[in-house]
């Protein structure tokens, strides 16, 4: 038991040496952790294949096949991904067919847009209803003083709440480099609509001048979705940027095991996070957005939608090939990490059962590990 507990603590301390010590892996916590890992819902994401989608080498329907083939629970997809093949360009019949394919494969669809503007949101709602989706990721891209931007976003969120109530939808606001996590929590608290919550991205808080775990805890009451990725922190003058790296690699500066554990534990009787999306963003460049010396009401510049350009020395052919490899790499890492956490929890639970004379031997299986149930549908 002690070796398993020590290894668990070692995992959760990785890149989190300056944080409070992780909780001890008691038998009660071990049992709960196993339950949460077995209920974990891993999703594919379109961003790891962005170059392939942009150059028409992969279609949105191919991502459904990928998610099914790897026994994931669903797909998170931006409505613009895929250019002329994207959901935004599909006819009503094509959207219906896309939704029907996802349903036949037993996959949930979560849509994403990079806006909270009414026209963009209205179109996203049309697409969501056509494909049978109930969950939409949003984030704002306004320019102006922070106080003004916050007021505009609050008005947008109130409109989103009306749409959510009318059409039985959920909107999750992502912390996307320009707003701090506590600022997003303030907005969601003020609007107070239970259909409006948050998406927590593993790395975007870095550009907003935050640390990963404090940012997670500030946003914790509202987190429904998560973007998993690896990040190298890039110090700048009075701020930090980040560079996308392979999650779990030596270059990854994030405390991913600790964040994953804390996110799995959110929620009392039921898991709070409904989707952990595999959003590998290798070679994504994101400069600092908020600065340590900024005034109380800083100016927030306009930002474009996220895009990963070809790294120096890369050809388009190599990037297209490597995106497939990197996506597989992340899937192996995440499943390996949660598999090890589950195995350690099972060892602790088994040792406790033996010590108390319980005949149960504990469950050493790797569990579901974010997989969807096996299906016979085509």
Image: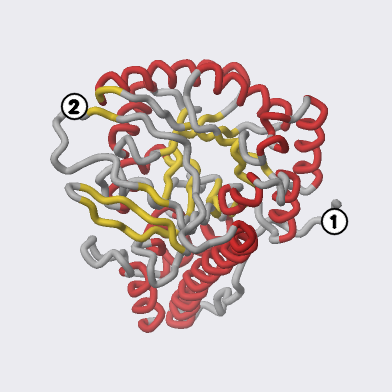
Seen in the picture, residue 113 relative to 215 is either above or below; the reply is: above
Q: Quadrant of the N terminus?
A: bottom left
Q: Are marks 1 and 2 in contact (CB under 8 Å)?
A: no
Q: Secondary structure at mark 1?
A: loop
Q: Residue at x 65, y 59 (%)?
A: 371
Seen in the picture, residue 23 relative to 262 is either above or below; the reply is: below
Q: Residue at x 25, y 65 (%)?
A: 21
Q: Position of residue 262 (x, y in %)?
A: 39, 55
Q: Residue at x 71, y 44 (%)?
A: 60
Mark 1 neighbour density, 10 Å: few (under 14) some (14–19) many (20 or more): few
Q: How many labels, in total?
A: 2
Q: Position of residue 271 (x, y in %)?
A: 50, 48
Left or right, 25 with respect to 224, comes to left
Left or right, 318 with respect to 289, comes to right
Mark 2 neighbour density, 10 Å: few (under 14) some (14–19) many (20 or more): few
Q: Is residue 42 visible?
A: yes
Q: Quadrant of residue 370?
A: bottom right
Q: Find residue 297 and name its label.
A: 2
Q: Residue at x 31, y 69 (%)?
A: 13
Q: Position of residue 228 (x, y in %)?
A: 48, 54
Disc 1 target residue: 376
Q: Position of residue 159 (x, y in %)?
A: 48, 16
Q: Nearer the viewer, residue 149 or 24?
A: 149
Q: Secondary structure at mark 2?
A: loop
């Amino acid at each position: 038991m002690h070796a398993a507990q020590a290894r668990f603590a070692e995992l959760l301390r990785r890149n989190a040496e300056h944080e409070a010590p992780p909780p001890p892996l008691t038998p009660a916590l071990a049992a709960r952790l196993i339950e949460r890992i077995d209920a974990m819902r891993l999703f594919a994401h379109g961003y790891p294949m962005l170059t392939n989608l942009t150059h028409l080498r992969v279609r949105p329907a191919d991502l459904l096949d990928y998610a099914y083939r790897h026994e994931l629970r669903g797909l998170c997809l931006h409505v613009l991904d895929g250019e002329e093949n994207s959901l935004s360009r599909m006819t009503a019949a094509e959207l219906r067919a896309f939704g029907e394919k996802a349903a036949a494969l037993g996959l949930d669809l979560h849509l994403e847009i990079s806006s909270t503007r009414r026209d963009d949101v209205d179109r996203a709602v049309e697409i969501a209803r056509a494909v049978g989706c109930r969950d939409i990721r949003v984030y704002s891209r306004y320019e102006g003083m922070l106080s003004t931007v916050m007021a505009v976003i609050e008005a947008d969120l109130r409109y989103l709440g009306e749409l959510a109530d009318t059409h039985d939808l959920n909107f999750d606001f992502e912390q996307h480099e320009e707003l701090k996590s506590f600022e997003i929590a303030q907005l969601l608290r003020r609007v107070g609509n239970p259909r409006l919550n948050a998406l927590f991205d593993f790395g975007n808080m870095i550009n907003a001048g935050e640390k990963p775990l404090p940012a997670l805890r500030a946003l914790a009451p509202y987190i429904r979705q998560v973007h998993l990725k690896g990040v190298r922190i890039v110090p700048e003058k009075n701020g930090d940027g980040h560079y996308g790296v392979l999650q779990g690699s030596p270059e990854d500066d994030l405390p991913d095991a600790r964040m994953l554990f804390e996110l799995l534990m959110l929620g009392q009787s039921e898991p709070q996070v409904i989707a952990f999306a595999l959003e590998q963003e290798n070679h994504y460049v994101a400069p600092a957005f908020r600065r340590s010396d900024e005034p109380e009401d800083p100016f927030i510049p306009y930002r474009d939608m996220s895009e990963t350009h070809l790294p120096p020395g890369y050809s388009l052919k190599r990037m297209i090939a490597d995106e497939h490899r990197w996506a597989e790499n992340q899937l192996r890492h995440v499943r390996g990490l949660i598999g090890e956490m589950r195995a350690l929890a099972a060892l602790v639970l088994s040792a406790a059962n033996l010590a108390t004379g319980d005949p149960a031997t504990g469950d050493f299986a790797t569990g579901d590990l974010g997989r969807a149930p096996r299906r016979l549908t085509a």
